[in-house]
Amino acid sequence: MALDGVFLSVIAKEIETNVLNARVEKISQPSKEEIIISLRYKNETGAGSKKLLLSANANSPRIHFTNIALENPQSPPMFCMLLRKHLNTGRLIAVRQSGLDRVLCLDFEAVNELGDLTTNTVVIEIMGRHSNIILINQDNKIIDSIKRITNEVSSVRMVLPGMSYQAPPAQDKLNLFTASMDEVIQRFYKTPSIDVAKSIMQTLEGISPLLARELSYLALKGQDIEKDRLSDYYKQRIIDTLNELKQNLQIGNLQLTVCIEDSLKLNDFTLYDINQYGSKPKKTVYETTSALLDSFYADRDQQQRMKQRSNDLLKLLMNTSERITKKLALQQAELLECANRDTLKAYGDLINANIYRIEKGMHEVTLENFYEEACPSVTIKLDPRKGPAQNAQHYYLEYRKAQTAEQMLHDLMAKSQMELTYIDSVFDAVSRTKGESELLEIREELAEQGYIRATKQKSRMLKAQPPIAYRSSDGYSILCGRNNKQNDKLTLKVARNSDLWLHTQEIAGSHVIIETNGEGMDVPVRTITEAAIIAATNSQGRNSAQVAVDYTLVRYVKKPNGAKPGMVIFTDYYTAYVTPDAQLVESLRVK
């Protein structure tokens, strides 16, 4: 990704322009490596508030304003509490960047517990997996960080409370804003690489590979020319291109672009129009860096947050699924062993019929099997310690055991299969959760079913979420359950008998209801198709090419006695075959 030092300098200007001297209103930590600082400002353009997102996630480290509503955990983490202690009601007085390095410092002036005015600094280091958010005091001592770096992790630069803060080692590169163009060109030709784009990266700090390639593409007009073979004309074009970049950055003449192309596996952004890939990629231009980054990282970060929060549940469900699968395999093996029970009964009959030919002490006997045509000979093993009548009774006893075991195994296997189906449905619900409250509902459900220990949650903490609401193209209201408990409530309590019920065939997914207003099956085909796509998209088959979705009237849907949450049976149904479409489903969603 192209969040380089140059891009960070544009973000710094955006923060400085919008919220310099703004007051800290609220601090939260929605996930392990993210901080949100809400700032209330009043400037020439008016008054308001903005949320500043700081992320030290290895896959998406960044800082920008965000408009996305993020759900916070029930209790704030320790680092969040520490930030509140030192920054609450403080004022942002400076935004600093050292050169074009990917390190940004936010200075906050606040009153400490003794009533003295102090300046504390939040430092965000955007360095891939080494990214960090660090709080330091006015004496340059580290108060704490979102990631503590011990000597076991790095012997060069430790980040621990009480230590003096040291900035990351500076690279031996030039700053485009402070170095003269003569210095830049001299350094450019001294770099070891013969590739123009790599030489630009090795010369200037804060330049990402994508931006360096774009500058090379513009300067060389799309040609691939080695550095030592450049003509005077192209040497001058390189100087002009770098000067143009410098001027555009200074006056803010930028084209903040996201470039996406599946076949090229391209998903990147920069502050220039991207031309190096031709006209094939899809490009989107944004007005601000925050709008770009908010859009670019929204879905990925949501998945990452929920993965962190639901990791223990997913692990529990996977282990439970593996245990049930192994149990089913053992039960299947036992059932196969019971398949020869009729042979055991036949052996008992044969021994009784030939009891006069058998004596105590024999280990086996060969008899004619009158149960088969031609009466073939069969050898039957005997217990030499028992008489012939006792050996016959032994085979009858084994027959009755096998018969009873077969009946019990069928019941046990049916229960195990139902439990496995239920676990799959919970796993699917967890994988689709969008917030902490949805996870809490699922945890409560699993606690009620005995899979996890019940937690002492206050009722106010568990805010029940409503079903996901959609509006079809024909104007019909469509409701979709978020989890098994909500599926039960939606189907068995909320829906009316004349409404339509939809569910994916033989795979876990949400219950979907079309509110028909008494029309029953007379709902337009387009609405049924859209509801089926909603059901397919909110199921385990959301990545499939085609999914079968059953639909029927709610009056034909019943819940068996003792069935687990979300488990129902239904009759008089039809089946639609649809392709999941997340974009269509999102466009139908009621905001």
Image: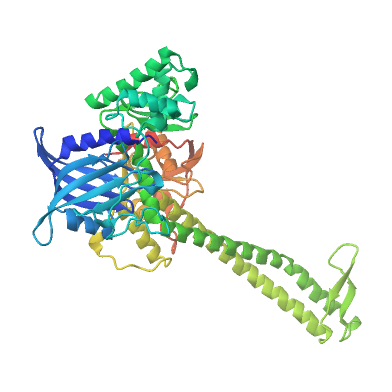
Which quarter shows the C terminus?
Answer: top left
Side (left or right) of 289 relative to 559 = left
From the viewer's side, name the closer residue of 37 and 372: 37
From the viewer's side, name the closer residue of 230 and 433: 230
Where residue 567 appears, x then y in whole percent? 44, 56
Where residue 242 appears, x then y in whole percent? 34, 23
Q: Residue at x 76, y 72 (%)?
A: 344
Asked if 38 appears above or below 270 in the picture, the reply is below
Farthest residue to the top: give it.
233
From the viewer's side, name the closer residue of 388 and 191: 191
Total residue callouts: 0
Where residue 60 appears, x then y in whole percent? 37, 43
Side (left or right) of 1 relative to 358 = left
State whether residue 391 appears in this view: yes
From the viewer's side, name the closer residue of 361 and 294: 294
Where residue 30 appears, x then y in whole percent? 29, 51
What coloring was used for the rendering? Answer: rainbow
Query: Where, by quadrant of the figure, is residue 437 drawn?
Result: bottom left
Asked if 193 appears above or below 106 in the picture, the reply is above
Asked if 38 appears above or below 419 in the picture, the reply is above
State whether residue 526 appears in this view: no
Which quarter shows the N terminus?
Answer: top left
